Amino acid sequence: MKTALVVWGGLELHEPEKGAHIVREILEGEGFSVDVTSDYTALGADNVGSYDLVVPQITGGELDRENSIRFCAAIEAGTGLAGFHHALATSFPGNARMRFLGGCTFATHPGDIISYRVDSKVTDDPIMAGIKSFEHTSEQYYLHVDPTVEVLATTTFSGEHAFWKKGAEMPVVYKSAYGNGRVFYTALGHKPAELDKPEIKTILHRGLLWAAR
């Protein structure tokens, strides 16, 4: 049986506990044994490397040096890492190790809640197979992204809310590696209710499974 750790916390606007349990339900439906906690130090526990997948659902927060080192070492050794929206992009923003690990850093979302298009870029990838471009209404994340990630879907900024960014094509879904560990991220899912949208739920579901060891 595969195992996963889901750690939630931070900005309540994102409803992190609810989102964590949606992830739990997805993984349990695939036969995983899942531990869910709001204790950030679980990320650096002695047994963190025994998990096949870790999913932080955390906005902001801090993780001390020792726990950060152990967490990064676990991913480098082969534990998978996955997250959606605030996870990875906003988790532990002042922690350089976590910025390097996650592959992206949240910058802003011009216009706040707006309608925009998500464009599939790699339709033959197992995460994106059969998913065509679609419209979505939510926060359109502007990210600073590691150039080595494999981009699976993007969004293009219209310039309506930040004219100097018009035409900027931004990754929305990507996968990457950290040592021997697989890393998956989707910027979609500002509120857990958004995960009910078929395209968004399918991308997350597949991405979680892909990232797991």
Image (cartoon, grey):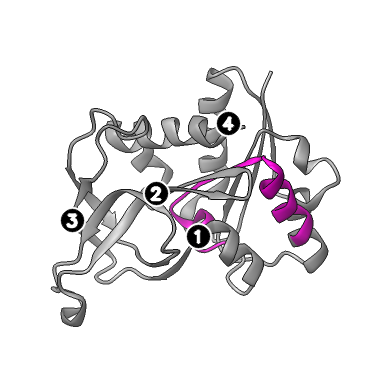
Look at label 3 and name its amino acid: Ser
Give how far across and how far down residue 54 sits, in percent.
64, 42
Neighbour class for label 1 at 10 Å: few (<14), some, many (≥20)?
A: many
* Residue with the mark numbered 3: 115
Q: Is residue 78 magenta?
A: yes
SS for dot 3: strand
Measured along the vertical axis of the image, is residue 87 above or below residue 54? Answer: below
**Quadrant into which the C terminus falls:** top right
Q: Give the range drawn in magenta.
A: 69-91
Foreground pick, 145 / 20 = 145
* Residue with the mark numbered 1: 103
Neighbour class for label 2 at 10 Å: few (<14), some, many (≥20)?
A: many
* Residue with the mark numbered 2: 174
Exactly how many numbered labels are in the figure? 4
Q: In this view, does 89 lie to the left or right of 9?
A: left
Of the two numbered discs 2 and 3 in the rendering, the one whose residue sits closer to the viewer: 2
